[in-house]
Amino acid sequence: MTTKTEAKEIIKTENVNLYYGERKALHGINLNFRENEITALIGPSGCGKSTYLRCLNRMNDLIPNITITGSFTLNGHNIYGPKEDTVRLRKEVGMVFQQPNPFPFSVYDNVTFGLKLAGIKDKKTLDERVEESLKQAAIWDEVKDKLHKSALSFSGGQQQRICIARLLAIQPDVILLDEPTSALDPISSQMIEDTLLNIKDRYTIIIVTHNMSQASRISDKTAFMLNGHLVEVGDTKKMFLTPDKQETSDYLNGKFG
């Protein structure tokens, strides 16, 4: 098994700048992400965390009047290349949003949606992938007898785990999560955290969170952003105990945010 020092960097970003029209929202971000690690992006509201996260699977392309510069590579491949297929990219770099967003279909059809889109029709393969993905998302036992029930009929926490299963079914390389537990109760949040810890040996996981306890519990690496700048990035334990920058210490100690 690869040790942390040998871990492969899956995503590399260099000198990332982003403008909404004339307004500059990201300022020269340099940040890399390694396999089998959870990286937490932290910082006060409006600091650029989610904006940066959405650059990694080109979700910002959907916003008008936006300009992005810098270098983004996924496994050495330029994701902003002129011939890049964004559908394929979003299969490799999947995303889970703040509000659970299952489709108004059955649990089974939610989890197989991306597979069927990719042309997989074999029922045995689909059945196996559904069970495997729901188990990985720690919700199989709760839904195994209700696979043909609408995903919308479950609780918010269950819906969010169904969305994670839907993502895992297409076997991405990277999972992006934008405050995935902020709309959930503490028990559901704990289940999501446990799920992420259980699957990180297969994925690169990047999570935006306002919850400092969550960041300290589940992440291997933490990046602190402020006003569109990357202030500091490093090993989570060290960041929380002995950060290098005063702004990081002030934020972690609740002096602003």
Image: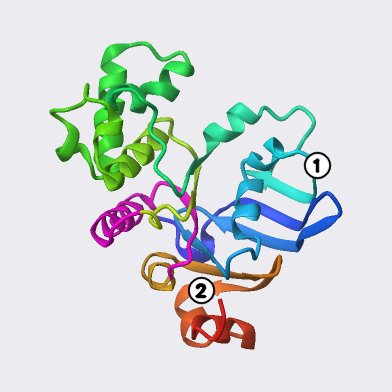
Q: Residue at x 31, y 40 (%)?
A: 159
Label 1 to label 2, Cα distance in Å? 36 Å
Residue 189 placed where, x, y %? 31, 57
| Residue 1 to residue 202: above or below | below
Going by the image, does 189 lie left or right of 49?
left
Instruction: Tell me the SS state at disc 1.
Output: loop
Going by the image, does 3 lie left or right of 154?
right
| Residue 39 to residue 102: above or below | below
- In front of the other: 137 or 99: 99
Task: Kindly indicate whether the residue at mark 2 contacts the one at mark 1 (C-beta within 8 angstroms).
Answer: no
Instruction: Tell me the SS state at disc 2.
Output: strand
Could you classify mark 2 by the number of other residues whose Cα lies within 10 Å: few (under 14), some (14-19), or many (20 or more)?
some
Q: Quadrant of residue 30?
A: bottom right
| The N terminus sits in image quarter | bottom left
Q: Residue at x 43, y 30 (%)?
A: 170
Callout 2 amino acid: Asp
Q: Quadrant of residue 255?
A: bottom right
The tag on residue 235 is 2
- In front of the other: 103 or 133: 103
Residue 156 placed where, x, y %? 30, 45
- In front of the other: 226 or 216: 226
Q: Residue furthest right?
A: 22
